[in-house]
Image: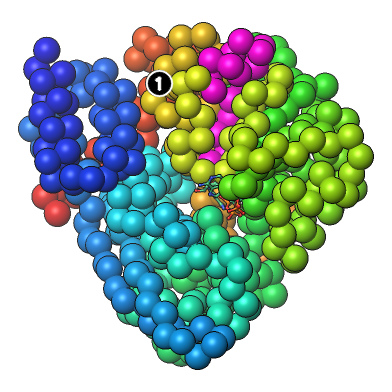
Amino acid sequence: MITKKSILEAIEIVKKRNPAQPEFLQAVTEVFESVEPAIARRPDYIKNKILQRIAEPERIIIFRVPWMDDRGEIQINRGFRIEMSSAIGPYKGGLRFHPSVYIGILKFLAFEQVFKNALTTCPIGGGKGGSDFDPKGKSDNEVMRFCQSFMTELCRHIGPNTDVPAGDIGVGAREIGYLFGQYKRIRNEFTGVLTGKALAWGGSLIRPEATGYGSVYFSDEMLKTRNDGLKGKVCTVSGSGNVAQYTVEKLNQLGAKVVTLSDSEGMIYDPSGIDEEKLTFVFELKNVRRGRISEYAEKYNNVEYYQGKRPWGIKCDCAFPSATQNEITADDAKTLVKNGCILVSEGANMPTEPDGVRVFIENKILYGPGKAANAGGVATSALEMSQNAMHLSWTRDEVDRRLREIMTEIHRNAYETAKEYDYPNNLVVGANIAGFTKIADAMIEQGLV
Ligand code: NDP
């Protein structure tokens, strides 16, 4: 009773203090409500005001990003870095460049990142950053000038032992290159200050693949609990960016068939499956030509393109949301369940609305929440940091083996924790409690900072 009251009070405080930030409130409410069984066992979490402290970023940096476009016109964007928690390591989390970016989106992502990073078994705190800059439709030179201006300010706040950003939506290999180049120029040091770097200058093999591969490894672990596997499963994937592409690649390798991809304008349905050759086309389309997924339907026969639609109406065994937040509504979740979907593994962050999550849990489908299922990306970033610190490079097999082990361990930890707290098979409760208790204990041990 006292526990519930304390949690509701903490949520109220967060609500009052962060008006007009619905995504942040959504993420906080989900975590706070699901860690109730842990708080009930540990009254010292209440006494130490862990909930209030954990939802308040340690530091927020907001800055002006002026740059000049190709026509010689001055453009102004806003840059952010949310340094959420350094309880168990330097701040770590991606940068997102997308017009929808504002402080509430980045706070939700930074908050999720804290628990996700705690689950990885690696010593990394949580952060997130980005800008309302839209790389779509910009020339390479414009993207470079923007990245240089962004890093000119950000470089004074980050460092290999302080805060190590990476990519996210709109920030891929090209952007990381420009950001790294500017950091190196201003600070006159070649260090592992960003992850997702190219292989020749400090990157790690498997980092580009890691989030997608990890989400598939996680789904395999979930299926194993029911003596099942991915072979022969029909899968829907949303998005067509980094996470979606490597999700498809790994699903193909493990004998599944992927029938959808999407972008912000629509989706394609290819009943015969997106095989290796078609995926090579997608890599070139999205990463080199930066085109639209509709072109896939123009190139291949018997493929439908649905303008403005997401893939959740297509019948599938397993779904891999890999585009963005809140892309599965409660109705979408009901449709998935009705059509026989038995598994959802979230490559994206918070892609399912809270009512949709309830539908999955009530129907006992295998549901891997993003902070567990997509943690392979940041875990491999931590492996990149380790390699940078040791000035060496592991082989592809070595990194992939470690990634696989980490995903297995994240699943085991979430699964066992859920069981320990009497929520068997509920990986939302399991992942949240496992991440939360690790952070909370570190905060108490380090005193009131
Ligand atoms: P990319 O920018 O490479 O790709 C994003 C994809 O999602 C694109 O196909 C994009 O379409 C689509 N998309 C973006 N916004 C929307 C929207 N509002 N509605 C519909 N579709 C949209 O990003 P990533 O693949 O890196 O990231 C995808 C998700 O995975 C995000 O939630 C991210 O936070 C999460 N994630 C990423 C990690 C990583 O390592 N990259 C790690 C962990 C999580 P379009 O091209 O039209 O914009």
State whether label 1 is within 8 Å of ligand 1. Answer: no
Locate the N terminus and report the quarter of the image it occupies: top left
Visible residue check, residue 89? no
Label 1 belongs to which residue? 355
Q: Quadrant of residue 103?
A: bottom left
Q: Residue at x 13, y 33 (%)?
A: 12
Depicted 401 relative to depicted 361: above or below = below
Using the image as rendered, state which of residue 317 and residue 33 is in the foreground.
317
**Residue 14: image location, x then y, percent:** 17, 40
Using the image as rendered, state which of residue 249 and residue 17 is in the foreground.
17
Visible residue check, residue 59? yes
Depicted 29 relative to depicted 201: above or below = above
Asked which secondary structure carries label 1, the reply is helix
Depicted 317 relative to depicted 48: above or below = above
- Say whether residue 279 is magenta: no
- Say whether residue 345 is magenta: yes
Residue type highlighted by circle 1: Asp
Using the image as rendered, state which of residue 260 and residue 369 is in the foreground.
260
Locate the C terminus and report the quarter of the image it occupies: bottom left
Where does the magenta region start and end? 332-348
Using the image as rendered, state which of residue 387 and residue 86 is in the foreground.
86
Q: Residues within 10 Å of mark 1 (few under 14, many from 20)?
A: some
Q: Quadrant of residue 196?
A: bottom right
Q: Residue at x 32, y 29 (%)?
A: 30
**Residue 396: image location, x then y, percent:** 74, 55
**Residue 438: image location, x then y, percent:** 32, 37
Does residue 372 appear left or right of residue 157 in this picture? right
**Most extreme residue toward the front, as rendered?**
307
**Residue 277: image location, x then y, percent:** 90, 48
Does residue 435 appear left or right of residue 272 in this picture? left
Q: Quadrant of residue 159?
A: bottom left
Q: Residue at x 65, y 52 (%)?
A: 242
